[in-house]
Image (cartoon, rainbow, N blue to C red):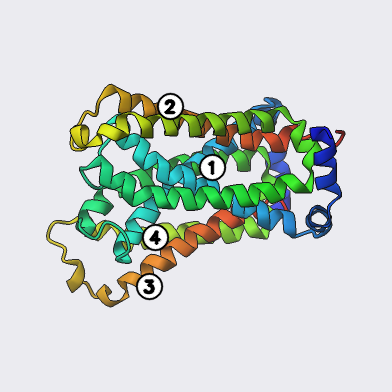
Amino acid sequence: MSVQDFADWLYGTSLSGSIRAVGWLIPAIQSVHILAISIVIGSALVSDLRLAGVLATDETPATVVKRYLPWMWGALGLLLFTGLIMVLAEPGRTLGNAIFWIKMVLVVTAFTLTLVFRKPILDPEFRIDHAIWAGATRPLAWLSLAMWVAIIFCGRWIAYA
Amino acid sequence: MTLDTLFQQLYDSPLSAAIRENNAAFPWIESLHVLAITLVFGTISVVDLRLIGYPAHRRGARQLIVDLLPYTWAAFGLAVASGGLLFASNAVAYAHNSQFQWKMLTILAAGANMVFFHLTAYRRIIDWDDALPPPLAAKIAGATSLALWILVIFFGRWIGFTLSIFS
């Protein structure tokens, strides 16, 4: 079964049809998706700028990350949920689109990087300057931000590719 | 000269034509616009939540505002610039679109709310800088701001679904 076959089958299901039948639903779901990505990028911005040494350097990295990391995970849940509804409603437009898959790879990568390089900071025993990757903290912070920006561009480009 | 004449002139301008005729121009400008608004909402929500009483990464509200508002303003500038180009590319149609009109009004309201806050409660911020919960005036300012910007995002998305090709 090809991706196209699967997308066609999914499009034909009553669930997919029901979502599309409610005119305001897809725009509303997209809007919630945009709000959720705003939470992610706002949280990432403050956390990454702190780790890059640009913002709030009078607060410890742990203090900053502690405030924003739970919101990133919460927003990710909302993004996956709203994203799933959009895929169910328009499977061909998403699953059949290379930009969608590039975005998914970026999303997995960005959140994996967040898990690996941000979560440990919350551990009171963790010393960020003693981490193996301590020297790469700043470049990694800028890379993280760049990835969120790329994800946002991919998100909009799905509609045009 | 009516507004419609002005919008028609904008539509007839070489800049507007260039955006319309280049297949990639509109998507790139629109993506930049989306990035800008996520940064506006992303940063302002941290301040607004603090005003409502949800703690931020620092205790003092004043320093938080001083830290973050430059980023909000820079993002807003990018949103206006990119939004202006998007508008120019199809000025008459957007101008006549109800959701676009509501979006502009809501942005104005958000601005008014911000000005009011800065002229009143913010003037006395030394009194309530560390206070959690913050005073009622701050909570109202924060909640109103959040609600209005959420509406801006909903209206913005709706334009794409309601734009008429007939103007």
- CA gap between label 3 and label 1 equals 27 Å
Provide the secondary structure element on which disc 1 rests. Answer: helix
- CA gap between label 4 and label 3 equals 16 Å
**Camera-nearest residue between A102 and B150:** B150
Amino acid identity at mark 1: Ile
Q: Earlier in the sequence, mark 3 or mark 1?
A: 1
| A91 with respect to A49 (left or right) | right
Q: Are marks 2 and 4 on the same chain?
A: no
- CA gap between label 1 and label 4 equals 21 Å
Is label 1 or label 4 in front? 1
Chain name for mark 4: A
- CA gap between label 2 and label 1 equals 19 Å
Q: Are marks 3 and 1 on the same chain?
A: yes
Is label 2 or label 1 in front? 2
The residue singled out by tag 2 in the image is B144
The residue singled out by tag 1 in the image is A34
The residue singled out by tag 4 in the image is A112
Amino acid identity at mark 3: Pro
Amino acid identity at mark 2: Thr
Percent position of residue B61, x then y: 26, 40
Give the residue at x 39% y 60%: A112
Percent position of residue A8, x then y: 73, 44
Tell me whether circle 2 and circle 4 mark residues in contact (CB < 8 Å).
no
Is label 2 or label 4 in front? 2
Q: Are marks 1 and 4 on the same chain?
A: yes
Amino acid identity at mark 4: Thr
Mark 3 surroundings: few (<14), some (14-19) or many (≥20) residues within 10 A: few
Chain name for mark 2: B
Chain name for mark 3: A
